[in-house]
Amino acid sequence: MKFAERMSRLGTETAFEILVAARALEAQGREIIHLEIGEPDFDTPANIVAAACKGLQEGHTHYTPSAGIPALREAIAEEISRTRHIPVDPAQVVVTPGGKPIMFYVILALAEPGDEVIYPNPGFPIYESMINFAGAKPVPLRLREERDFRFDPDELRDKVSDRTSLIIINSPHNPTGGLLTRDDLSAIAAIAIERNIPVLSDEIYCRMVYDGEFQSIASLPGMSVSDRTIILDGFSKTYAMTGWRLGYGVMPTALAAHVTRLMTNSNSCTAAFIQDAGIEALKGPQDASYRMVAAFKERRDVIVDGLNQIPGIRCHMPKGAFYVFPNITGTGLRSKEMEQFLLHKAGVATLSGTSFGKYGEGYIRLSYANSIENLRKALERIAKALEDR
């Protein structure tokens, strides 16, 4: 069978490959501490589960509008309007099975062969993968440790060209936990407005901020979702709903029509009873989400302190999300070597920094979506394995 050339341009998400390798070691009797997967280790709040069950019992198992059921789109519009301080119409909302389809559809809708798309590097690997798949040119914007894993505005301006069709940003950031400041967003906005470039703002971790304050570029003048910003958000992280597959995009109405048509041609729609759960998540009690974020902050402090006590490792304090991105150059190991060393010698599953792009060399990513007990055990194992090698 002959495969289309575009398939050679499609990347992957390495976390799932490492998970498979870790599970294989567990099948051999090894105990592995999982710090590789970016998934809350909490259960979905009971009220959200109950709403989905109620939907099933009431027969909400049929097709829905491709852009989402009106009640959920209205709830999302209200949420974004309240939190980003901008007017949002439900017609600007498209509900999708997870957040990745928004990346996929927006890039397909806006980037053509010969176009350039600027994206953060290190960054979520699907950005680069989808840009390549669409036939556009990925243009990495380096995030620098010395700038709290933020970009240099001068470097951004240098990378913009007449072929730039989209800028992608992510704050709080995966894999570094970095948080863009208002000055950073203003620098992006000035370029986007001057050159009329849309911005895809991945805000999936917006409720997971520990130091500072989350700010959306959509809140800046000239950058609303009626102008040129596309907000990507969802329920996976905030409400521990990764397996439910429920995300959404908020964007200019004209773009929403194209993204909806892509939904019709691919997924048809998002499951009705899962959208019922999404309404409850937004409108119901938020206590469980607040408790989860407080627990992550405590875990963050434990793992950063522990990593900084290990010779050869230095770890920046992340301001959001639930990842640390320690610098491991002092160990003498490259990122992929460290990933494999820790998995096989220490029994700790982590991810090489290069899983997130070329500028991730010299780093590894650890998710602290695990118990404090397991985090302490992982730190002990890492320290001992490096000491004994």
Image (cartoon, grey):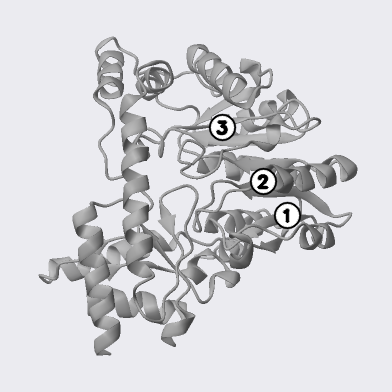
Q: Earlier in the sequence, mark 2 or mark 1?
A: 2
- The residue labelled by disc 2 is 107
Say whether marks 2 and 1 touch (CB < 8 Å).
yes
Instruction: Please give left or right for residue 180 compared with residue 11 in the image.
Output: right
| In the depicted structure, whether residue 362 falls above or below residue 286 | below
- For the residue pair 54 and 39, the one nearer the viewer reads as 39
> Few, some or many C-alpha atoms within 10 Å of disc 2 (few <14, some 14-19, many ≥20)?
many
> Given this view, does label 2 or label 1 mark the residue nearer the observer?
1
- Number of labels in the image equals 3
Q: Which mark is residue 117?
A: 1
> Could you say where residue 167 lies in the image, as x and y percent from the top left?
72, 49
Q: What's the CA distance linking mark 2 and mark 1?
A: 9 Å
Type of the residue with mark 1: Val
> Could you say where residue 282 lies in the image, as x and y percent from the top left?
43, 21
- The residue labelled by disc 3 is 263
- Rendered image quadrant of residue 287: top left
> Given this view, does label 1 or label 3 mark the residue nearer the observer?
1
Locate the C terminus and report the quarter of the image it occupies: bottom left
Q: Earlier in the sequence, mark 3 or mark 2?
A: 2
> Few, some or many C-alpha atoms within 10 Å of disc 3 (few <14, some 14-19, many ≥20)?
many
Name the element at disc 3.
helix
Residue drawn at the location 77% of the way across and 58% of the way down = 156
- Is residue 333 at least partly visible in the picture? no
Name the element at disc 2.
helix
